[in-house]
Amino acid sequence: MVYRVIAALLMFLIILSCGGQEVKKGSPEYIKEINDWHKERINRLKKDNGWLNLAGLFWLNEGENKFGSDKDNDIIFPEGMCGYAGAIILRDDSARFISSGNCVITSEGKKVERLMLADDMSGNPTMLQYRSFRWYIIRRGERFGIRLRNIDAELVKSFKGIDRFPVNEDWRLEADFIKYDPPKEIIIPTVIGTENKTEAPGYLSFNKDGKIFQLDITNAGKGFFIIFADMTSGRDTYGAGRFLYCEAPDSLNHVILDFNKAYNPPCAFTPYATCPLPPEDNYLNLEVRAGEKKYGDNH
C-alpha cells in the first residue's frame, strides 16, 4: 500500500513538473495584450475576406475556361452555383469574363455580361458574385487561377479557434536589425511549387537561452514580415512554418520580436491557399514554444 502511494505521488509530481513548463508567464497587462491580439486575429479569419470561407482554387488554361457546377465544365464549382455560369477567357496575361446568361452574376452590385478582370496582383481584383459565392483572379508567377469564396461556408460557422501555447513573456525578445548592403536576394518557395525572388533588407539577430539565432526578413508596410520554421514544426505547430510581423527598428536598430504573435499561414486551414514557405536561412534549430499550434489534422 505504501509503495502504491509513493508511486502515485511520484507520478503526480512528474505530471506537475511537465505541466509547469506550459503555463502563462507575464504581467496581467501583457497577457491581456496578447489575448486581445489573438481575438482580433480570429475575427479577421472569419470576415468575408478572411481565409476560412475559401471554397476552391482553380488554375486557368490559356483560352476558354467554362465554369459552373455541371460536371462537363472545364472548371467545376460546388453545388449551389448555376450549372453553366459562363467562361473566363485567358489571353496574353489578361482575363475576361463572359456570362452564359443562365444566371445573374454581379460585380459591385451590378449585373455583368462581359467584363475584363483585374487580378489580385493589381491590388484591386475584380470580384464576381452569385448568391453566396464570390470569386476573383489570382496570379502566381506565370499562372492564373480563380479563387472562390463561399460567404456561408460551414467552416466559418463551426470554427472554434486555434490552440496556442500559453502566453509567455520570455518569448518577447529584443533583436538587432542587421542591414544587408546591398539587400540580399532570397528565394521564397510556395506550397504550389513556384518560387518567388524577393529582397531581404537585412536580418534579425536574437539571443535565446545563451544562443544566437537569426532570421531573414522582408519589408511589410512600416515593419517586417518573417516566415520561419522551428523544431516544433510538424509536431506541435504547422509543418510548413509560421508567420510573424514586427515593427521597424528603433534608432538603435533594435526590434521587438514577439513569438507569442507567431501565427499559422492560411494553408493550415484550407487547401485552397497558395502559401509561401520559409526561405532557406529561416529554419531555426530551436523549439519556439510560443504562438499558435497546428490546427486540426494539419501538420
Image: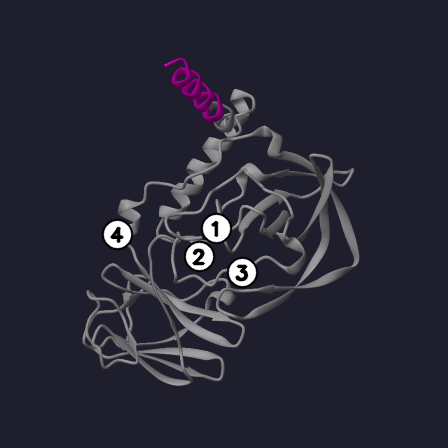
Q: Are the residues at dot 1 and dot 2 in contact (C-beta closer than 8 Å)?
A: yes
User: Which of the numbered marks, if any, corresponds to residue 154?
Assistant: 4
User: Which of the numbered marks, if any, corresponds to residue 276?
Assistant: 3
Q: Residues within 10 Å of mark 4 (few under 14, many from 20)?
A: few
Q: Which of these two is toward me, 177 or 116?
A: 177
Residue 263 lies, with reference to residue 13, above or below; the image says below
Which residue was labeled with disc 1?
238
Q: Earlier in the sequence, mark 3 or mark 4?
A: 4
Residue 221 visible in the picture: no
Q: Position of residue 237 (x, y in %)?
A: 49, 46
Q: Are the residues at dot 4 and dot 2 in contact (C-beta closer than 8 Å)?
A: no
Q: Identify the secondary structure beneath mark 4.
A: helix
Compared across the picture, whether 254 is left or right of 194 comes to right
- Discs 3/1, front: 1
Q: Earlier in the sequence, mark 1 or mark 2?
A: 1
Which residue was labeled with disc 2?
267
> Which portion, as a residue range, is magenta?
1-15
Distance Cα–Cα, label 4 vs label 2: 17 Å
Residue 15 lies, with reference to residue 88, above or below; the image says above
Task: Tell me which amino acid carries mark 2.
Answer: Cys
Q: Identify the secondary structure beneath mark 3.
A: loop
